[in-house]
Amino acid sequence: MNHTRYRRPAALLLLTLGIVCAAAVVAWVASGDEGGLVLLTELYAHIVPLGWLALAALTGAALLGLARSALRLPLVTALLVVGVPLMLLAGFVSVTFGRPSAQEKTEPAPGRGDRRLVVERDSTLLDPVWHVYVQQGRRPVERRWSVGFFDGDSDANALRETVWTSPDRIRMTTREGAVHEVTIAPGGRVGQAEVSREKPRRVRRLVLRSSSATAAAPSVTVS
């Protein structure tokens, strides 16, 4: 059987696959943290496998498509010499510094179905870490902005509560009582945080009063 006629279609298919995978990796790197597409953010766990797949597909496309070309060997060599160390480094960085976070809370803004609050918690280290985001838009163009970051190394930094106070305002409270409030712009961007202290709660105390005419009776006063 003559397999020569299948070389070009197979090379074209591998080339297309390699370009798509490489484009996904580049788009994720270029998206950044602020205002990036949520779909690209969710690609983080698959970036290294996509990179290896792109490298393998492009190498296969060069081997099949350039079977009789003098460029075949230099191109394949360049792909492997540059691509393999780069992917090994990316895998090392991902394993060492990549910390997957679990979604702890998601809550839509009052009266708005296209905006939601997302709290993610990372417990892989000794102290938990919280990331607070606001996501706005509909899939697949939903975008994400960072609202706050809390390191649970102390009660002053440990996140206790995150709530909407209005459709464009978020309040974050630490265990020690520090209150961080931010305003969300119509486009989704996050404003400067306003920091204050949580108001102390009023405690009811029971006071006993005695009278010579009547038996002692408890009464409740507020201090």
Image (spheres, rainbow, N blue to C red):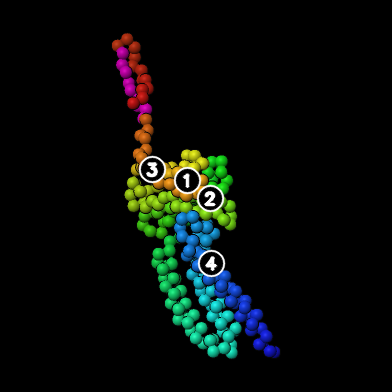
- Left or right of 97 in this view: 46: right
Give percent across and percent down for residue 210: 31, 16
Q: The residue under label 3 is which amino acid type?
A: Glu
Which residue is at a point 45% across and 44% down the rendered structure image? 183
Circles 1 and 2 in contact, beta carbons < 8 Å? yes
Give percent across and percent down for residue 163: 47, 43
What crowding class fits label 3: few (fewer than 14 Cα within 10 Å), some (14-19), or many (20 or more)? few
Determine which residue is flagged by label 3: 194
Determine which residue is flagged by label 2: 136
Vertical arrangement, residue 217 with respect to residue 188, above or below: above
Q: Earlier in the sequence, mark 1 or mark 2?
A: 2
Q: Work out whether residue 167 or residue 118 is closer to the camera in this orientation and state it.
A: 167
Circles 3 and 4 in contact, beta carbons < 8 Å? no
Task: Calculate the distance from the C-alpha at mark 3 to the C-alpha at mark 2.
Answer: 22 Å
Determine which residue is flagged by label 4: 24
Give percent across and percent down for residue 176: 34, 43
Which stretch did the figure color magenta? 203-211
Q: Does residue 42 appear anywhere in the picture? A: no
Give percent across and percent down for residue 68: 59, 90
Q: Main secondary structure of the magenta part?
A: strand
Task: Calculate the distance from the C-alpha at mark 4 to the C-alpha at mark 1.
Answer: 29 Å
- Left or right of 139 in this view: 192: left
Mark 2 secondary-structure assignment: strand
Q: Is residue 205 magenta?
A: yes
Determine which residue is flagged by label 1: 184
Task: Calculate the distance from the C-alpha at mark 4 to the C-alpha at mark 2.
Answer: 22 Å
Which residue is at a point 39% across and 45% down the rendered structure image? 193
Dividing the image into 4 quarters, which one contains the N terminus? bottom right
Mark 4 secondary-structure assignment: helix
Q: Earlier in the sequence, mark 4 or mark 2?
A: 4
Vertical arrangement, residue 167 with respect to residue 41, above or below: above
